[in-house]
Image: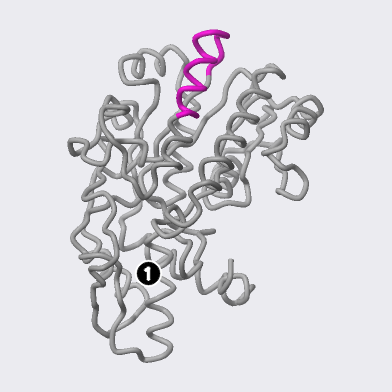
Amino acid sequence: MNGTQKRIFVAGHKGMVGSAIVRCLQRQGARSIITRTHAELDLTDQGQVRAFFAKEQPDEVYMAAARVGGIHANSTYPAEFIYSNLMVQNNVIHEAWRSGVRRLLFLGSSCIYPRLAPQPMTETALLMGKLEPTNEPYAIAKIAGIKLCESYNRQYGTDYRSVMPTNLYGPGDNYHPENSHVVPAMIRRFHEAKMSNAPFVTIWGTGRAKREFLYVDDMAEACLHTMGLPQQVYVENTQAMESHINVGTGEDLSIGELATLVAEAVGYRGGLKYDTSKPDGTPRKLLDVSLLNRLGWKASTPLREGLARAYVDFLAQQAREPEAVATA
């Protein structure tokens, strides 16, 4: 079937990653993209999901729906993070199989790897050590999703693939002051500090933890690239690597260095203070992306450029829905 004629379901199309996948599909000429809001389809309800697949009969699925958040959100709502993510991915993957979907892409997270995994983290590091306690429930749910895809492939001959993105940021992000990831949280805090002429901005932790960041539209392109690989190529390259592929830039920086770049993007000229009573989380999280690079894809958006675009998106969200930006 021609790629432009496929019926493609993007689960989680309102989220940052899902919306980027929709944009990328549209750029590539996809004509039949199926989407549902949470109000239209509750993915935690198996009956609703089963009825949806029976009616829509998609050819491919991008599994981008997930409950996500930073250290604070993961620590505060562990039950919601493990329950919601397990339910959503179990329902979507199982009902995709029941309805005859042959190809599906599951989006995981780099937090699936052990807290002290050798850096950069290769695909084979999965299940080789203890997870980071602050996001263990979310990580376990994502590991279950990978294994679910592997198991259906082995037993039923499906072509369900998994990609593990590093920390993502960009258009459509969540800028909640407590429940967001580090980049949107910093953008919001530095913007508010600039508006109020605050003398300094407080950063959680020591600032020494190192992280890798990928612009979300790059992630979407990597997803489509991975889905476009011939099945034999995907299987041959992932068989010895737990059947998933890392997606990232292959470069990291300290949280302190990130804060300096965000301040520059926002135009904040005050100082930085570090709250060392707050956790750093995993000391370092850098993905080994050599496999995906060998398969023909590499990130293209420099961090400084991506942060500038993200700040423009924040301002646009604030102009459209100031209350949503404040409380989302």
Image spot of residue 171 (x, y percent): 50, 59
Magenta residues, start to end: 144-159
Q: Residue at x 40, y 15 (%)?
A: 233
Q: Characterize the local packing of mark 1: few (<14), some (14-19) or many (20 or more) Cα atoms within 10 angstroms.
A: many
- Relative to 322, is 116 above or below? above
The secondary structure type at the circle numbered 1 is helix
How many numbered circles are shown? 1
Q: Main secondary structure of the magenta part?
A: helix
- Relative to 97, is 84 above or below? below
Image spot of residue 301 (x, y percent): 35, 52
Q: Residue at x 52, y 61 (%)?
A: 174
Q: Residue at x 39, y 67 (%)?
A: 308
User: What is the quadrant of residue 33 in the picture?
Assistant: top right
Q: Quadrant of the N terminus?
A: top right
**Is 295 situated left or right of 119 in this image?**
right
Q: Residue at x 48, y 42 (%)?
A: 220
Q: Name the kind of residue labelled 1 in the image.
A: Met
Image spot of residue 117 (x, y percent): 22, 36
**Is 221 situated left or right of 30 in this image?**
left
Q: Closer to the camera, 57 or 107?
A: 107
**Is 169 situated left or right of 29 in this image?**
left
- Relative to 139, is 90 above or below? above
Q: Quadrant of the C terminus?
A: bottom right
| In the image, farthest residue toward the bottom | 197
Image spot of residue 54 (x, y percent): 79, 24
- Relative to 292, is 212 above or below? below
Question: In the rendered image, which residue does mark 1 sit on?
Answer: 186
